[in-house]
Amino acid sequence: MTGDVVYSSPHAGSCHPETMEESAEHRPLYGGAFTALLPPNTRDVSDLREIPDNQEVFVHAHTDQSLIVELLEYQEGMSDPDAARYHFEDVAASNEAQGRAEVVSVEPLPLAQLSLSGCSSAWALTGHQLVSKFNEQAQNTVKIHMALFRIPQHATDLLVTFNDPVAIDPSSSSSVSVSSGVYSPWTLDDFHRLLCSFQLQDPGVFG
C-alpha cells in the first residue's frame, strides 16, 4: 500500500561533502556529460549487459545494492514532491511492486550543498518496496532512497536511486550473495556524497 507523503526536516537528507572518503572515485557518466563521486566497490552494469541510453546503472561488487541514474521527461503540472512520488511509483511498477510500495518521507535537498548547476530544485524521497528477483516467489524488502533533480529548462527530471535491500527472504537467490564474504555495504552517507558531487559538464547531453 502507498502511504502519505510526509515532509521532514530539510536537514535530514543533507549532504556533507567535507566527509568524502578517499576511497570514493569521481567517475564520468553519460560519456562525460556528468561526473559524480561513486562509492567504493562499484561495478558498472553496462560492462555486463546493455543499458538504456538514458540510464547509468551500478551495482555493489559484493551485495545486492544498486545505484541508478536516469534522465527522464520533466513532469509538468505537478508539485515537486508529487513529481518525486510519481517517479517512485513508476519504479514500483518496473519492479512489479504495485500495492507493495510505500513512501515514508519526501523532503527538499538544500541547493547550496549541491554541485549540479541549472537545477531549479532537488528533493529526497525515502520509501520501501517488496520486490521479487528474477520472477521468484520470495519477496525482499528494499529500502528506496531517491533524489530528484528538476531541470525544467531542459525538460528533464534527473533521478538518482539507491536500492538498499534490508530484509532478504531466505529462499531468495539474493540470500547467497548477501551472506557470503566480507564486504562493506554502501551507506546513506555514500549516497549523500554522490548527490553533493553530481556535476554537469556538457549541457549537450539534453539534446
Image (cartoon, helix red, strand yellow):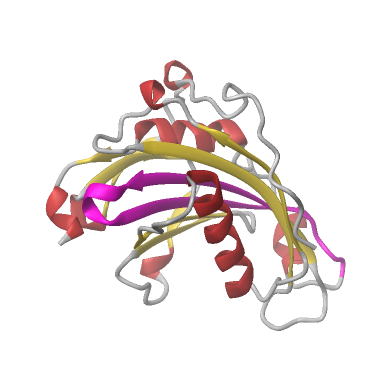
Name the spot of residue 127 as percent of width and height, x first.
Answer: 69, 50
- Residue 205 seen anywhere in this rendered image of the structure: yes
The answer to whether residue 13 is above or below residue 101 is above
- Residue 180 seen anywhere in this rendered image of the structure: no
The majority secondary structure of the magenta stretch comes to strand
Left/right placement of residue 203 relative to residue 113 reads left
The answer to whether residue 115 is above or below residue 47 is above
Residue 113, quarter of the rendered image:
top left
Q: Is residue 34 magenta?
A: no
Residue 175, quarter of the rendered image:
bottom right
Q: Which residues are magenta?
A: 143-170
Name the spot of residue 82 as percent of width and height, x first.
Answer: 55, 51
Name the spot of residue 49 as percent of width and height, x first.
Answer: 41, 76
Viewer-proximal residue among 78 and 198: 78
The answer to whether residue 35 is above or below residue 62 is above
Q: Is residue 157 magenta?
A: yes
x 64%, y 54%: residue = 63
User: Which image quarter is the C terminus in?
Assistant: bottom left
x 37%, y 68%: residue = 46
Viewer-proximal residue among 62 and 52: 52
x 48%, y 20%: residue = 16
User: Which image quarter is the N terminus in?
Assistant: bottom right
The answer to whether residue 117 is above or below residue 173 is above
